[in-house]
Image (cartoon, rainbow, N blue to C red):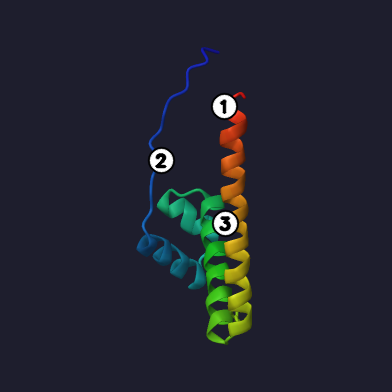
């Protein structure tokens, strides 16, 4: 073997094309049939379908009000913790500067 790799351009597909492919599948055609007719890899089409299913579940969950809820008290706790972590970060930055000088 010569060990040479031929570079192939990676094709990009826009969201509209992906939606059209998924409509064909939901219309009753098999993934294999759609993939072969459009010259696509079947694994890629399966991945698109999985991504669409995940997006559907997430949007349904948010629409039903199952998203994250933060009370005012929790919000204040998060802000206080953020300030504390920022102070720790600043102290560590100063310490790093001191130790990196090579006393």
Question: Which of the 4 quarters of the picture holds residue 46?
Answer: bottom right
The residue at the far bottom in this view is: 64
Q: Is residue 42 left or right of residue 88?
A: left
Residue 71 seen from this side: no
Give the residue at mark 1: 101
Image position, residue 54 (x, y; %): 57, 68
Badge 2 marks a residue whose secondary structure is loop
Give the residue at mark 2: 10
In the image, residue 42 sits, relative to residue 82, either above or below, namely above
Q: Nearer the viewer, residue 5 or 41?
A: 5
**Quadrant of the drawing holding the N terminus:** top right
- Sequence-earlier tag: 2 or 3: 2
Q: Nearer the viewer, residue 5 or 93?
A: 93
Q: Which mark is residue 86?
A: 3
Q: CA distance from mark 3 to mark 1?
A: 23 Å
Tell me whether circle 2 and circle 3 mark residues in contact (CB < 8 Å).
Answer: no
In the image, residue 47 sits, relative to residue 26, either above or below, namely above
Residue 7 seen from this side: yes
Q: CA distance from mark 2 to mark 3?
A: 42 Å
Image position, residue 75 (x, y; %): 58, 77
What residue appears at the point 55 percent right and 80 percent down from the top-left corner? Answer: 62
Q: Nearer the viewer, residue 53 or 45?
A: 53
Image position, residue 52 (x, y; %): 52, 67
Q: Nearer the viewer, mark 3 or mark 1?
A: 1
Q: Nearer the viewer, mark 2 or mark 3?
A: 3
Q: CA distance from mark 1 to mark 2?
A: 47 Å
- Sequence-earlier tag: 1 or 2: 2
In the image, residue 6 sits, relative to residue 96, either above or below, namely above
Q: Nearer the viewer, mark 1 or mark 2?
A: 1
Label 2 packing within 10 angstroms: few (<14), some (14-19), many (20+): few
């Amino acid at each position: 073997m010569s060990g040479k790799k031929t570079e192939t351009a990676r094709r990009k597909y826009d969201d509209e094309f992906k939606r059209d492919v998924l409509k064909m599948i939901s219309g009753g055609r098999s993934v294999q049939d759609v993939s072969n007719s459009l010259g696509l890899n079947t694994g890629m089409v399966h991945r698109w379908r999985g991504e669409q299913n995940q997006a559907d579940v997430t949007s349904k969950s948010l629409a039903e009000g199952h998203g994250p809820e933060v009370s005012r008290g929790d919000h204040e706790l998060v802000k206080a913790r953020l300030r504390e972590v920022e102070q720790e970060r600043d102290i560590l930055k100063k310490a790093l500067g001191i130790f990196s000088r090579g006393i």
